[in-house]
Image (tube, grey):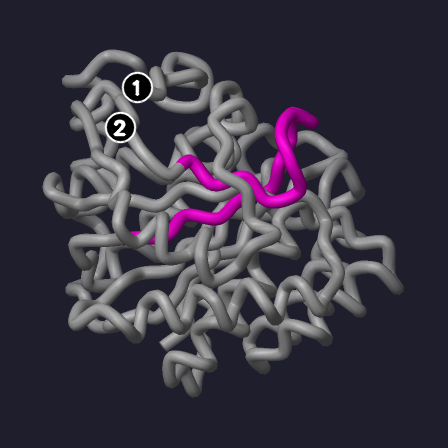
Amino acid sequence: MVREPAVAGLFYPENREELLWWLKEHMEDTPSRIYKAKGIMVPHAGYIYSGSVAAKVYGKITIPDVAILMGPNHTGLGPEVSLMARGEWLTPLGRTYIEETLAEEILTEAPFVEEDRLAHLREHSLEVQLPFLQFLNPDIKIVPMVLYPITFSKVQALARALARAIEARDENILLVASSDMSHYLPSSIAKKKDNLAIERILALDGEGLVRVVLENDISMCGYIPTAVMIEASKLLGAKSATLVSYSHSGEVTGEEPVVGYAGIIVY
């Protein structure tokens, strides 16, 4: 099965050379890779808006040979947790294969996760992450998952399943949570709400993140993938988190309301 690009030319350049130029321009400005991350949270808007935040995160970490990508389900297609377990994904930079053995292990460890392709066909939240990973490690393999809002008990169960599947392998595997922050609010309000969520992420408090998002009506689309990433990273030994960058769309457009973007490393 081949997953064709759905948002090349919309969220990021569809021309290979133009995409490489963009990545080189933004990645070469980042510091040397100083973190061996367990997990990261990165935004998924168009590169013109949030790409620089994502680039700053990717530029600070060592990219392993396998990454588990988790994002929110924007399309309304597929089951509550959709995992594409076989095949390959294409971008203008080429093909990336799914790590099928790891995908099968996750399906075994978490029975409520369903093998599904439909939810991934038009979903952008994972696709926009792939060129960064391909650029930094052309040999990387992925396990892609998109999630509806699920209960925190299922967040914990999925985190345990991911940790068990990763621990069974003698290699570093990166957990990537794809999420934007507040959507379409005045920048002052967006920053205030986003800080509440960011505080919980930096505290490695997945349950607190879910609670704060729901109690304060924070329109952070990927709070569930981020909570899973936090809880799994802790099980894998993570002790700290760092906010690498925060911005919002108004810094590019000069307009209000805005969408917020944060980049965080968990290690």
Q: Can you say whether 38 is above or below 106 in the image?
A: below
* The N terminus - image quarter: top left
Residue visible at 26% across and 50% down in the picture: 101
Dot 1 or dot 2, earlier in sequence: 1
How many residues crowd mark 1 within 10 Å: few (<14), some (14–19), many (20+)? some
How many residues crowd mark 2 within 10 Å: few (<14), some (14–19), many (20+)? some
> Based on the displayed image, in which of its 4 quarters is residue 7 positioned?
top left
- Element at label 1: strand
Proximity of marks 1 and 2: CB atoms separated by less than 8 Å: yes
71 falls in the magenta region: yes
Q: Mark 2 points at which residue?
A: 88
Residue visible at 37% across and 38% down in the picture: 85
- Apparent side of residue 49 relative to residue 197 in the rendered image (left or right): left
| Closer-to-camera residue (215/77) | 77
**x, y percent for residue 246:** 53, 56
| Closer-to-camera residue (194/123) | 123
181 falls in the magenta region: no
Q: Can you say whether 36 is above or below 234 in the image?
A: above
Q: Mark 1 points at which residue?
A: 2
Three-letter residue code for mark 2: Glu
**x, y percent for residue 187:** 73, 47
**x, y percent for residue 79:** 65, 36
**x, y percent for residue 223:** 65, 55
What span is in magenta? 67-84
Three-letter residue code for mark 1: Val
> Based on the displayed image, in which of its 4 quarters is residue 163 positioned?
bottom left
* The C terminus - image quarter: bottom left
